[in-house]
């Protein structure tokens, strides 16, 4: 009895040590992840001249100034880029969801002829593609250059997302679809009224994946778009961060103050470009884990 009691004490002590070490590790991981976000936020609200002289950690705004946000708000390209990004994200996400759900629904049919062969051909595209130059030639040949369609159509379906959605569709009982077919429902009705409503966690994950992908995309816009008024927000942000294109936002600033205010403008632009994703994600987060698990149970 005494030896068993000692073992229980050792086990309890070991569990407490493990819990403490695990909690410390998770806290440090959270701090490392969260601090860069807070640094950008605090820097964007700091006084430009004081931020330029600041060294070390930034745990709160160094001074307080919203001058950088005012400069961002006055830049017409930021507002135009926001609008273009919203159009690309909303249209592209709906197109992605429509095409992905159609492809996943077809591949989930148990009596589909040559199903394995079609699946292998689709999987092949995950590892091999024609490359950027053939895609550019195709886009140019179709007359899509300098249009949003050049960004949306080549990425209408993501193979990995379609496989995840197909696996989710295969988990739906076949008897539900057979009952609907007996009542006269065709495949489109079955997909819209039975399959998709029962797969909302996966649909939410697809909306998150595709939406964030479109929101963060800039490379395709840089390759295919020529008119500046069609540039998405991320391409404008790239110009500000990499090429230091800040002249339109520092016209009323003295030459000696352009560099300090330019740094805070960069941080403010990053915050403005990041806020929508941070706001939307919490509403879809509860579906994220469930949707991915449902879509990954089967191979």
Image: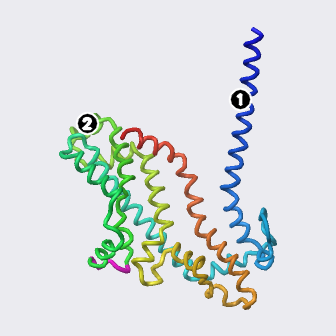
Q: Is residue 283 above or below residue 46?
A: above
Taking the spot 48% from the left edge, 69% from the top edge, the residue there is 86
Marker disc for residue 15: 1
Inspect the magenta stretch and tell me whether residue 271 lies in it: no
Q: Which residues are magenta?
A: 142-146
User: Is residue 102 something that shows in the picture?
Assistant: no
User: Is residue 30 something that shows in the picture?
Assistant: yes
Q: Which residue is mark 2?
A: 179
x and y percentages locating residue 28 in the rendered image: 71, 49
Along the line of sight, which residue is nearer the eye, 290 or 184?
A: 290
Q: Quadrant of the C terminus?
A: top left
Along the line of sight, which residue is nearer the eye, 17 or 118?
A: 17
Left or right: 209, with 268 as reference point:
left
Q: Is residue 238 above or below residue 5?
A: below
Residue at disc 1, secondary structure: helix
Question: Would you call the spot at circle 2 few (<14 residues within 10 Å), some (14-19), or many (20 or more)?
Answer: few
Magenta stretch: helix, strand or loop mostly: loop
Q: Earlier in the sequence, mark 1 or mark 2?
A: 1
Q: CA distance from mark 1 to mark 2?
A: 53 Å
Residue 230, quarter of picture: bottom left
Question: Would you call the spot at circle 1 few (<14 residues within 10 Å), some (14-19), or many (20 or more)?
Answer: few
x and y percentages locating residue 179 in the rendered image: 25, 36
x and y percentages locating residue 246 in the rendered image: 62, 84
Marker disc for residue 171: none
Left or right: 100, with 241 as reference point:
left
Along the line of sight, which residue is nearer the eye, 273 or 32?
A: 32
């Amino acid at each position: 009895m005494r030896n068993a009691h000692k073992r229980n004490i050792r086990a309890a002590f070991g569990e407490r040590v493990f819990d403490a070490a695990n909690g410390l590790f998770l806290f440090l991981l959270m701090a490392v992840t969260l601090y860069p976000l807070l640094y950008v936020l605090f820097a964007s609200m700091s006084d430009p001249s004081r931020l330029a002289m600041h060294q070390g950690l930034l745990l709160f705004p160094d001074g307080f100034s919203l001058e950088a946000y005012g400069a961002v708000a006055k830049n017409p390209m930021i507002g135009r880029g926001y609008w273009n990004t919203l159009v690309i994200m909303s249209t592209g996400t709906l197109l992605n969801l429509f095409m992905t759900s159609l492809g996943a629904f077809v591949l989930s049919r148990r009596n589909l002829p040559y199903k394995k062969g079609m699946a292998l051909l689709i999987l092949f595209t995950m590892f091999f593609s024609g490359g950027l130059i053939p895609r550019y030639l195709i886009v140019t040949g179709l007359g899509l250059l300098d249009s949003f369609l050049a960004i949306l159509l080549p990425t209408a379906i993501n193979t990995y997302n379609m496989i995840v959605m197909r696996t989710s569709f295969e988990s739906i009982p076949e008897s539900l679809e057979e009952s609907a077919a007996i009542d006269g429902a065709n495949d489109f009705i079955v997909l819209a009224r039975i399959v998709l409503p029962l797969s909302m966690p996966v649909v939410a994950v697809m909306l998150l994946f595709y939406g964030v992908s479109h929101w963060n995309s800039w490379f395709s816009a840089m390759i295919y778009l020529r008119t500046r008024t069609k540039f998405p927000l991320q391409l404008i942000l790239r110009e500000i961060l990499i090429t230091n294109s800040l002249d339109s936002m520092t016209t009323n600033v003295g030459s000696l103050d352009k560099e300090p205010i330019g740094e805070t403008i960069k941080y403010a632009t990053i915050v403005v470009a990041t806020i929508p994703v941070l706001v939307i994600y919490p509403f879809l987060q509860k579906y994220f884990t469930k949707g991915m698990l449902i879509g990954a149970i089967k191979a």
